[in-house]
Amino acid sequence: MNSQQTLTLRAAADRGKADFGWLKSAHTFSFGNYHDPNHMQFGVLRVINDDVVSGGGGFPSHPHRDAEIFSYVLQGALQHKDSMGNGSTVSEGGVQFMSAGSGVTHSEFNPSQTEPMRFLQVWLIPETSGGEPRYETLSIDDSEKQGQMKLFLSSDGRDGSIQTRAKANVYAAALNGDEVVEHDLGTVPKAWLQVARGKVSLNNEPLVAGDGVAIEGGGMLVLSDGVDAEVMLFEMP
């Protein structure tokens, strides 16, 4: 770890909570009826909602604009329809991305009537407003993220990642046992690590599912001691 690097924990237990029956959600940042002036956003990262949707439940058609929104499916499947004519179902390990641009409406549902589905819903702030809305999906194979960082969203669309209008690069990694993942942020001023599931250590600090860490000052990140762990890393150059 470099001497300039600071890590600030956003503990899972401290997140805002919402329970609508069909939807149980934990909010890392202010969202909906949960407002915390100390946790409005971090860099271009505006929303991380940890959502569990009951069988047959979902979000009816609603509008978005000037937001880069992706859903990272952790359990079950997520069905999407939008005003651009897109319709798709993304299963565990999949990413559904929407660049809202000048405006789009969409709906999201759990296609199973009996099994719950869980996903992380993330909103990033685009560099510029307006523009044509766009929709894309990506399936991340387990082998691409096991014991390593897999880039799946980037500002330049490199290495087969989805291109976003936000100034951010987003990676996924899974760790178990003695696997160690090292990632050098270099001089990237802000980054965020979100633990999607399991347990893991970041620079020897233990973390659990739902924990987030604000990272400032760049430098090396070392992930270790994974127990069925899956994490998401946001670089914000």
Image: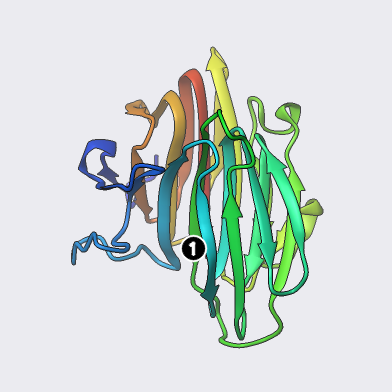
Seen at 25% across and 62% down, the residue is 33
Q: Residue sitting at 56 percent across and 29 percent down?
A: 114
Residue at 45% from the left image edge and 48% from the top image edge: 219
Q: Residues within 10 Å of mark 1 (few under 14, many from 20)?
A: many
Looking at the picture, does residue 139 appear above or below residue 45? above
**Residue 39 picture quarter:** bottom left
In the visual, does 8 lie left or right of 46? left
**In terms of secondary structure, where does tag 1 sit?**
strand
- Vertical order, 108 against 124 (above or below): above
State the residue lying farthest toward the top. 177
Q: How is the image coloured?
A: rainbow
- State whether residue 187 appears in this view: no
Quarter that holds the N terminus: top left
Q: Is residue 231 visible?
A: yes
Q: Of all residues shown, which one is farthest toward the right?
A: 160
Q: Nearer the viewer, residue 154 or 52?
A: 52
**Residue 192: horizontal and vertical position, in percent?**
42, 51
Viewer-proximal residue among 125 and 183: 125
| Mark 1 lies on residue | 123
- 185 vs 230, nearest the viewer: 230
Residue 165 location (% of width, % of height)? 63, 73
**Where in the figure is residue 16, as x and y percent of width and height?**
24, 50
Q: Position of residue 3 (x, y in %)?
A: 32, 47
Under mark 1, the amino acid is Trp
From the viewer's perspective, is 217 left or right of 228? left
